[in-house]
Image (cartoon, grey):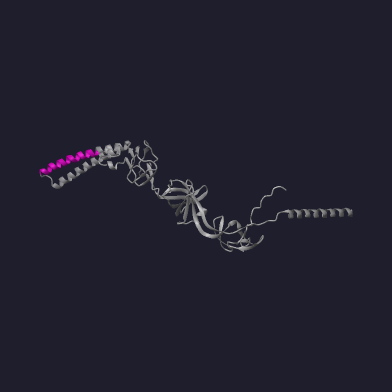
Amino acid sequence: MKKSITVIILLIIVIAFGGSMVYLYQKNAEDPITYQTEKPSTQTIIKKTVATGSILPLEEVLIKPNISGVIEEVYVEGGDYVKSGDLIARIKVVPNLAALNDARNAIDAAKISFDDQRRNYTRQQSLFEKGVISQQDLERAQVAFDQSRQTLEAANKRFDIVKTGTTKGLSNAANTLIRSTVSGMVLDVPVEMGNQVIESNNFNEGTTIAAIADVDKMIFEGKVDESEVGKIREDLPLEITVGALENITFDAVLDYIAPKGKEENGAIQFEIKGTLKKLDTVFIRAGLSANASIILDRADSVLALKEALIQFDQETKKPFVEVATGDQQFERREVELGISDGIYVEIKSGISQDDEIKIWNQIEPERFGG
């Protein structure tokens, strides 16, 4: 019995010894880890956040009619340049039956009053010639007669305006002639000949005949998330890139941040606007999608290192790097960091440009085979 136990113990020892030898052999057969190094470089680091939006005119004027009717003729199209007062379209009035009837009734009432005042004036004039009434009474009768005549003329003009949109003596200011109120480019003409339009008044904003804007004064209008709005402020520089215009960047200045956010797709968005510094050689179409890089901070030509090379102490959380002092020998040095763009970070102190920094988190190449 004792002999069997002894044999078992010896077998266990032999197996353990053999396993240890195999492990040590495999361990020695592995390639030793060789760390590569990288030197700091001089970089211009720009810390920024990005907002999406579009390019729009600073001021876009919508031309609307002040009388309802049907478009008889359109004189402009999108892309045309117009001056203030230029003719845009002409409207043919389709009279409103109720308004037309009221205007006709006003003429009848004004004619009755005019006939009555004319008879009274004739009678007063006869009495004045006979010396029955004074000069003052005659003058009062003449004033009433003149007023009734003016009221009748006004009623006739009102009837003409309701029926045709214009009247005698007002052809230059006819409501049927739609003119531009500003100078600029015609961005859009949403109506065509034969379309019915509605006048602009206190109860209806009216039909847009044309949209006109000065395309030399453009702005970026976009939105930023609530997590970013606290980082930005007015007067910060913007770099605008337009998707339709490759390899062109426009400078702008952030001049408006909405005081109130709006919920969109479960997130609070804040509207921002920036005045664009337009290039004279480039034509930007209104409504183009664009991205604005808001420059939060900038450091020109500073000593920089890739963020991936920075390590942080587990206890103090202070940043440090490992600097090569010999062949695969490194020493730890604490560094002071500046701004970062997510790839490079500014090094204010701790290392020099000639130092070799350990790439501590390099990816080992995959092994194939046994």
* In this rendering, position of residue 8 left or right of residue 361: right
Instruction: Name the residue nearer the viewer: 349 or 61.
Output: 349
Can residue 161 be found in the magenta stretch?
Answer: no
Q: Residue at x 89, y 54 (%)?
A: 3
How far from the left and from the top, in percent, is residue 324?
64, 61
* In this rendering, position of residue 324 left or right of residue 258: right
How far from the left and from the top, in percent, is residue 86?
33, 44
Q: Residue at x 52, y 50 (%)?
A: 267
Q: Is residue 296 visible?
A: yes
Instruction: Name the residue nearer the viewer: 54 or 125.
Output: 54
Instruction: Name the residue nearer the viewer: 61 or 260.
Output: 61
How far from the left and from the top, in percent, is residue 243?
49, 46
State the extent of the magenta-drawn residues as a range. 109-130
How far from the left and from the top, in percent, is residue 170?
27, 42
User: In terms of image quadrants, where is residue 30?
Assistant: bottom right
* In this rendering, position of residue 29 left or right of residue 124: right
Q: Is residue 257 visible?
A: no
Can residue 129 be found in the magenta stretch?
Answer: yes
Q: Is residue 167 above or below residue 45?
A: above
Q: How many marks?
A: 0
Main secondary-structure element of the magenta-colored stretch:
helix
Q: Is residue 98 above or below residue 20?
A: above
